[in-house]
Image (cartoon, grey):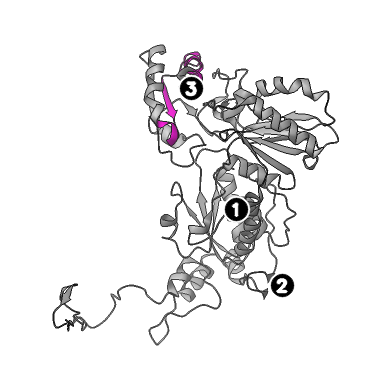
Amino acid sequence: MDLESNYEISRVANFIRSNNFTRVALQFPDELLKDSTMAVKALRQVLDSSVKLYVMADTTYGSCCVDEVGAAHVNAECVIHFGHTCLSPTSTLPALFIFGKSSINASNCVENLLDCGLKSGKPVLVLFGLEYTHAIPEIKEALTPYISSLNGDFLFADAKCSVIIPYEASGPRNQLRQSDSQVAGECFSKGNGLDYTMGGLRWRLPEGRKMEDYLLFWIGLNNPAFANVLLTFNSCETVRYAANEVCLVTDLSQQKKVLKRRYYLVEKAKDANIIGILVGTLGAVGYLHMIHHIKELITKAGKKPYTFVMGRPNPSKLANFPECDVFINVACAQTALLDSKEFFAPIITPFEAMLALDRGSQWTGGYVMEFQDLIGSTPVKAREQPEEARFSFLEGGYVEDLELQDFHEVEKDGVHALVNATEKALRICDDNSQSVTKGKARSGAEYFASRSYHGLDINVSNSLPEKFLIGKSGKASGYKNENVEP
């Protein structure tokens, strides 16, 4: 392995020296940790001894995002991010991204690219994983002699700048405003609808063209970045060039089935009463605004929100909260989409949550993965009165949403109405059994009040121990008083 080429040691050292950083966090994904010690040794040889280097592993959330939480533990002044990234804007720390250089057969890629262009008869838009950014100039050069003889045209996306600085670090005393840097949120404008950014790529369509006119040619792995492309541009014809296998994959039917399952989860979320909000990032710009917006949307829909901060979600963690009917994962575009088949409750994205909670909205087929694009896009409308019953595809008929009178009473009467609603939820009947509310539980208190088992009763007047039964004693291979046939 060429350490200098793959990890760009000279560029990293120049970035650190030119900005006078003395405490630097080096973030490696799990698959690159084996090279971290060699990279640190190489940097030590070219940096001053006053520069402190800290290797970060096992990131708090997705490894594609800058782990600002981990970097804050060592008071780092910047983060050097190695490997696959989503290039999500940072909140507090400047970051330099080293994409890496995965191997690719450029001539074979060009052959497949030309073949697709001839067969489809459409213009071709070339998108790629950032680890193949280094090979794009070579592919363009090899393609140039053939473009004039083809009827169609080829459009290549560009990789966004690899240095990101947050607004807080872009003041006059900060000297990071270099030619290869961007301020978070200022990298590209979508103005007239002809400009697009996604997963660290950006491109501009010619006037009069739209995305549906193009054949999408993806160079890279079948990873979350590619899934993002398939979902966002689900109406486009798409093929994938697997550079690691040196072949073209045209059958993407299995990947496109994901969209059908996402629509099913949206319908399931409409019937949810208790909704958990998973904080999937603490560094991406705008995540707090998105959480507040979703909370307000859930509350106006007459449902109960709960917010959970637990790092990377897994089935065991979320199983501790069985009262939640659905979870909303507020995270970057490449980690927000989770396969929730193994989870106790489904996990949806902020876009899917807005479709489910905003009464009357319809899914037109478009899909948005970046939650920054959703902030302020859906105004929260106050409900004046309960709406009429809606049709539930899961229930197979018309159902009434939860009564919103209690919600409006709490808004009007404040604490008094809230106390009355809580007492009603925890009311105990004369037969010592908890009253079950009509329909599903509307809060965590109601959920636990309706459970058949509530633990030990500490209010029992009888202080004597209850009778208990003694089971069989001995070893499992032969309990005492057990008749064993010879």
- 208 left or right of 75 in image: right
Residue 12 is one of the magenta-drawn residues: yes
Residue at x-position 48% and y-position 70%: 419
Stretch in magenta: 5-33
First in sequence, mark 3 or 2: give its number: 3
- 57 left or right of 101 in image: left
Quadrant of the frame with the N terminus: top left
Q: Alpha carbon of mark 1 to alpha carbon of mark 3: how far?
A: 40 Å
The answer to whether residue 4 is above or below residue 65 is above
Pointer 2 local density, CA inside 10 Å: few below 14, some 14–19, many at least 20: few
Mark 1 highlights which residue? 294
Mark 2 highlights which residue? 388
Q: Alpha carbon of mark 1 to alpha carbon of mark 2: how far?
A: 23 Å
In the rendered image, residue 217, in percent from the top left (x then y), is placed at 70, 36
Tag 2 secondary structure: loop
Asked whether disc 3 touches disc 2, contact meaning CB atoms under 8 Å apart, the reply is no
| Amino acid type for the residue under numbered disc 1 | Ile
- Please state which of the two labelled residues, at mark 3 or mark 2, is closer to the viewer: 3
Q: Which mark is residue 7?
A: 3
Residue at x-position 55% and y-position 27%: 103
Tag 1 secondary structure: helix
